[in-house]
């Protein structure tokens, strides 16, 4: 066991329901409605205006999480949107200060607590069971799966955590969130971005013509979703990210055996779909709509439908009583936090090891969907740190391969305040000497500019030109760039309503 990280106020959260109870103590973090809502397009259209934020086309805003209690045609279900669509809300759900989230999640990566297996009869996720071998089984009628826009390839599960194991070593288990589209009554298509561990498991199983058993877990403790979004090399092949969630909560995530396949599920999930990824079977993602589109993706555009995706054959669905289907409106602030917080933690871990003491903090900015843009705050200590600062940016690009742009700022710049970062760019940056280009490097296939059609210098789709913007003051000129200093007072004496 690794050394326990710095203590913080861990809230009493064990599942999604206790997370909602915790949020209700804050006046501005959670709302619910009994007004009827349609799952196709309407629900996403409502929450787009209430709290989607992120890279969603304006008008949008950062708002509360929202529960829809009256789902047309699904009287026994509720849908929750936006649980993680605010950095402040994530802070309250994890009990960590907003500006410390990346650092503390980094500590949890090194203070792992493995999952714990419990008996099926003690697992809330199996209170209600639907078996696919029943004649009337149809997941489209059982679960209220939303579409975001009229172009969507079909209904999508957007907060579905998949658990799979290496067919050559069942103790090697991974959890990851993937894009799942409902294709018919008992089949889902699954999209894997390059390099995902469960896709490697699938390929191994396919080589021996075997199905890969997986559980799809929906409606979870927010700490599980955040932890599951770590990627290699911070969580290498064979590392179970549920151990990080254990570190964040200081207690094990509970698992239980699935009822229809040889796999485990998260015992306190609201909904579990049990299934198998079939070998050597592919499907067109938009076969039911022919829109040519998939769904809104994190960069702010609707992605293209994939012409050949693996198929999950559903074997069973289990739920809690009065279950909550958790989803997100993408692209939005919820994706920013899901992807961005592990990005921040990964960069912090790597730079503290390679250049200790230089990096003060890191922010995976909303404009990059938590993936494409990072702000690094550094504190130079001597003239050698002029070079170390730029090396820090290169190291950040190395540890998180989907990162596209890095902005470097000094310790007196608030990296979470975009205006302050842009101010640093206006007064501490000269384009011809402070810009570093790294051309034709692996990036992210969902950024539409990362294509030879956009930039002929790129050799393949998903490659990009990575850029470092050094907006820090050269060490020898630090004395010429001191910001105006003001008297430190407590303003609540004059404006108590603004500083509660």
Image (cartoon, rainbow, N blue to C red):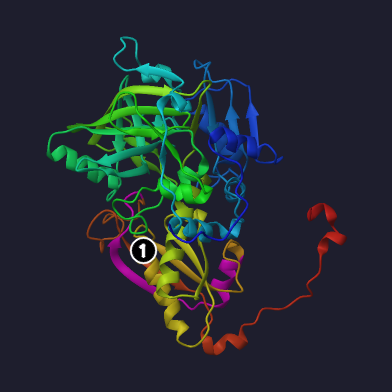
Residue 204, horizontal then vertical, whole percent: 18, 42
Left or right placement of residue 101 versus residue 214 in this view: right
The range drawn in magenta is 420-446
Residue 492, horizontal then vertical, whole percent: 83, 59
Residue 191, horizontal then vertical, whole percent: 30, 39
Crowding at dot 1, Cα within 10 Å, few <14 / some 14-19 / many 20+, comes out as many
Question: Which quadrant does the N terminus fall into?
Answer: bottom left
Left or right placement of residue 341 versus residue 46 in this view: left
Measured along the vertical axis of the image, is residue 83 above or below residue 43?
below
Residue under pointer 1: 399
Left or right placement of residue 257 versus residue 300 in this view: left
Say whether residue 424 is magenta. yes
Q: Residue furthest bottom?
A: 476
- Residue pictured at 41% horizontal, 47% vertical: 114
User: Is 297 or 76 nearer to us in this picture?
Assistant: 76
Q: How many numbered callouts? A: 1
- Residue pictured at 38% horizontal, 17% vertical: 130
Q: Residue furthest top?
A: 135
Q: Identify the image quadrant of residue 51.
A: top right
Say whether residue 212 is magenta. no
């Amino acid at each position: 066991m690794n050394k326990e990280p710095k203590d913080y106020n861990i809230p009493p959260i064990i599942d999604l329901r206790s997370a909602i109870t915790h949020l209700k103590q804050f006046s501005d973090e959670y709302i619910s409605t009994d007004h009827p809502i349609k799952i196709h397009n309407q629900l996403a259209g409502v929450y787009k205006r209430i709290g989607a934020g992120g890279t969603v086309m304006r008008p949008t805003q950062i708002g509360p999480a929202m529960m829809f209690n009256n789902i047309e045609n699904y009287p026994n279900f509720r849908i929750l949107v936006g649980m993680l669509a605010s950095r402040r809300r994530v802070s309250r759900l994890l009990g960590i200060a907003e500006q410390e989230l990346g650092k503390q999640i980094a500590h949890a990566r090194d203070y792992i607590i493995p999952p714990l297996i419990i008996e099926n009869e003690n697992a809330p996720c199996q209170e209600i069971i639907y078996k696919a071998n029943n004649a009337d089984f149809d997941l489209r009628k059982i679960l209220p799966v939303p579409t975001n826009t009229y172009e969507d390839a079909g209904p999508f599960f957007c907060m579905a955590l998949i658990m799979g194991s290496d067919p050559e070593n069942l103790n090697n288990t991974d959890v990851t969130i993937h894009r799942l589209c409902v294709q018919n009554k008992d089949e889902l298509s699954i999209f894997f971005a390059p390099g995902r561990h469960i896709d490697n498991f699938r390929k191994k199983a396919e080589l021996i013509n075997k199905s890969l058993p997986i559980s799809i877990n929906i409606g979870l403790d927010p700490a599980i979703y955040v932890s599951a979004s770590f990627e290699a090399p911070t969580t290498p092949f064979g590392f179970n990210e549920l151990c990080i969630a254990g570190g964040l909560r200081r207690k094990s995530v509970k698992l239980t055996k699935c009822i229809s396949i040889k796999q485990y599920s998260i015992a306190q999930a609201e909904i579990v779909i049990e299934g198998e990824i079939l070998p050597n079977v592919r499907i067109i993602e938009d076969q039911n709509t022919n829109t040519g589109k998939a769904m809104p993706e994190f960069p702010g555009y609707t992605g293209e439908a994939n012409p050949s995706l693996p198929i999950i054959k559903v074997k069973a669905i289990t739920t809690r009583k009065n279950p909550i289907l958790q989803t997100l409106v993408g692209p939005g602030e919820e994706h920013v936090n899901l992807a961005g917080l592990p990005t921040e933690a990964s960069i912090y871990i790597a730079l503290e090891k390679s250049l200790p003491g230089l990096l003060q903090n890191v922010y995976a900015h909303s404009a990059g969907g938590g993936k494409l843009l990072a702000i690094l705050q550094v504190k130079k200590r001597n003239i050698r740190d002029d070079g170390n600062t730029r090396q820090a940016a290169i190291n950040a690009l190395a540890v998180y391969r989907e990162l596209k742009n890095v902005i470097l700022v000094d310790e007196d710049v608030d990296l979470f305040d975009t205006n302050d970062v842009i101010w640093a760019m206006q007064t501490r940056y000269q384009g011809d000497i402070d810009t570093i280009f790294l051309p034709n490097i692996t990036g992210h296939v969902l950024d539409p500019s990362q294509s030879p059609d956009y930039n002929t210098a790129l050799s393949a789709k998903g490659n990009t030109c990575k850029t470092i913007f050094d907006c820090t003051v050269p060490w020898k000129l630090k004395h010429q760039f001191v910001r105006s200093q003001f008297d430190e007072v407590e303003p609540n004496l004059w404006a108590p309503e603004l500083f509660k």
